[in-house]
Image: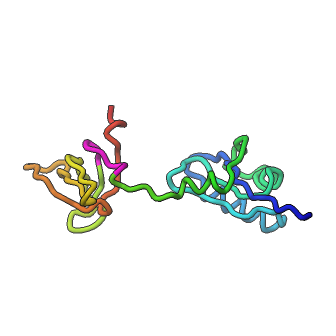
């Protein structure tokens, strides 16, 4: 009976801002030493950490040993089903709230910052007022033309 081992995702702590460099150094070690690492994942929203996919923690420990910018492996692991939850698409309207500061990423007002004054989830739109405008007036934009810069709850 050949039982297939389900790969797991191991979280590795790195120096802040050095996630991609660490991943490349680990990749080079895995290639030269032929370590059984399936993938190395750098998520842009997860600062100071990278995920390494392997069958057991031992190749991960070997891959990160004495690598510059890598601090340690976090205890535990995630199964593939647990890891998939990070990639489920959430509706952006659920994330945008009144009072959030956003950056406009498309159109004539690209790169301008604005404050959200209304969210319309049915139409997938937000109404914003530009920051620093002499006479603030409401502008209605599609939700995919903005990016959240600062949440209203973080401003406190």
Residue found at the far right of this picture: 1
Q: Position of residue 66 (x, y in %)?
A: 78, 50
Residue shown at 32% from the left, 49% from the top: 96
| Magenta part, dominant SS | loop
Which image quadrant: the C terminus? top left
Q: Quadrant of residue 81?
A: bottom right
Whether the magenta-drawn stretch holds residue 97 is answered as: yes
Q: Position of residue 132 (x, y in %)?
A: 17, 48
Left or right: residue 136 versus residue 42 is left
Whether the magenta-drawn stretch holds residue 113 is answered as: no
What colour scheme has been applied to the protein in the rendered image?
rainbow
Number of on-image labels: 0
Region in magenta: 94-101
Of residue 44 and residue 128, the one placed in the foreground of this image is: 128
Of residue 78 and residue 100, the one placed in the foreground of this image is: 78
Left or right: residue 107 versus residue 96 is left
Residue shown at 33% from the left, 36% from the top: 155
Q: Position of residue 4 (x, y in %)?
A: 82, 62
Of residue 100 and residue 95, the one placed in the foreground of this image is: 95
Residue found at the far left of this picture: 135
Residue found at the far top of this picture: 156
Q: Position of residue 71 (x, y in %)?
A: 69, 44
In the rendered view, tell whether residue 33 sits above or below residue 65.
below
Q: Quadrant of residue 108?
A: bottom left
Left or right: residue 13 versus residue 64 is left
In the rendered view, tell whether residue 73 sits above or below residue 43.
above
Which image quadrant: the N terminus? bottom right
């Amino acid at each position: 009976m050949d039982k297939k081992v389900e790969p797991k995702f191991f979280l590795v702590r790195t120096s802040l801002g050095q996630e991609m460099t660490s991943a490349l150094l680990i990749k080079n070690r895995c290639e030269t030493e032929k370590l059984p690492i399936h993938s190395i994942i750098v998520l842009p929203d997860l600062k100071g950490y990278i995920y390494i996919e392997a069958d057991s923690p031992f190749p991960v420990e070997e891959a990160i040993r004495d690598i510059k910018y890598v601090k340690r492996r976090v205890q535990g692991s995630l199964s593939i089903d647990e890891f998939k939850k990070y990639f489920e698409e959430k509706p952006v309207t659920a994330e945008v709230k009144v009072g959030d500061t956003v950056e406009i990423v498309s159109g004539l007002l690209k790169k301008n910052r604005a404050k959200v004054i209304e969210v319309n989830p049915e139409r997938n739109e937000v109404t914003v007022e530009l920051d620093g405008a002499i006479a603030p007036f409401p502008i209605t934009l599609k939700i995919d033309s903005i990016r959240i810069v600062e949440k209203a709850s973080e401003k406190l």
